[in-house]
Amino acid sequence: MALTHRKKRPIDRNLEIVGDTRLLIIATEGRKTEKQYFAQFHNRRVQVKVAKDSGFQLAVSNPCFETWLLCHYILPTITKSTCQKITSQLSEELKKVHNSGYNKAKLNSEYFKPYIKQAVQNAKQLDNN
């Protein structure tokens, strides 16, 4: 294949320079919901790949990813509870706000996008460290 025809890549010159982390790894237990959520951040520097079992040991801060999703709407009060209870509470919040329940296999990431700043604030309040 000849190298004379290269695909043009867009250059976004309007971005302000921001000091950020070059590599951020988010390890999750799920394969669908988490990938669907993070795919909403369309950026050429963001790559969403399914975390594979690599034999690593890690500390878990919350029982499930749904805790993070719930932070988009409220400050969770049942973080020490089971994932099933948190998922149930998330479904209740989604019904209140969007008149739709929670579907783990088909996450509507548009429901969460406007509330990301709120989620960060709530998650910071949950972090004891």
Image (tube, helix red, strand yellow):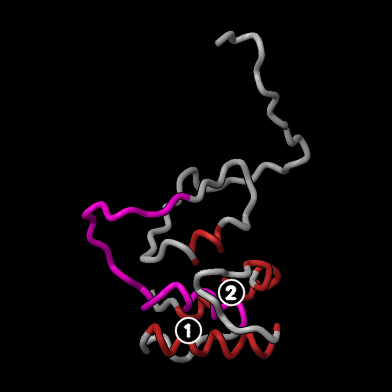
Instruction: Give the residue pinned by disc 1.
Output: 87
Q: Left or right of 63: which side holds 118?
A: right
Give the percent coordinates (x, y) of residue 22: 49, 43
Tell me whether circle 1 and circle 2 mark residues in contact (CB < 8 Å).
no
Q: Residue at x 72, y 31 (%)?
A: 11
User: Mark 2 is on which residue type?
Assistant: Ala
Left or right of 59: which side holds 100? right
| Label of residue 32 in the image | none
Number of numbered discs on residues: 2
Quadrant showing the C terminus: bottom left
Name the element at disc 1. helix
Image x and y of residue 31, in percent: 42, 61
Q: Which residue is mark 2?
A: 119
- Secondary structure at badge 2 equals helix
Q: CA distance from mark 1 to mark 2?
A: 16 Å
Is residue 13 rendered to the left or right of residue 117?
Answer: right
Task: Give the residues in magenta.
Answer: 49-73
Callout 1 crowding tier (Cα within 10 Å): few <14, some 14–19, many ≥20: many
- Residue 101 lies within the magenta run: no
The answer to which quarter of the image holds residue 2 is top right
From the viewer's side, name the closer residue of 2 and 87: 2
Q: Residue at x 61, y 41 (%)?
A: 44
* Disc 1 versus disc 2: nearer the observer: 1
Q: Quadrant of the N terminus?
A: top right
Which three-letter amino acid code belongs to the residue tagged 1?
A: Thr
Residue 57 is a magenta residue? yes
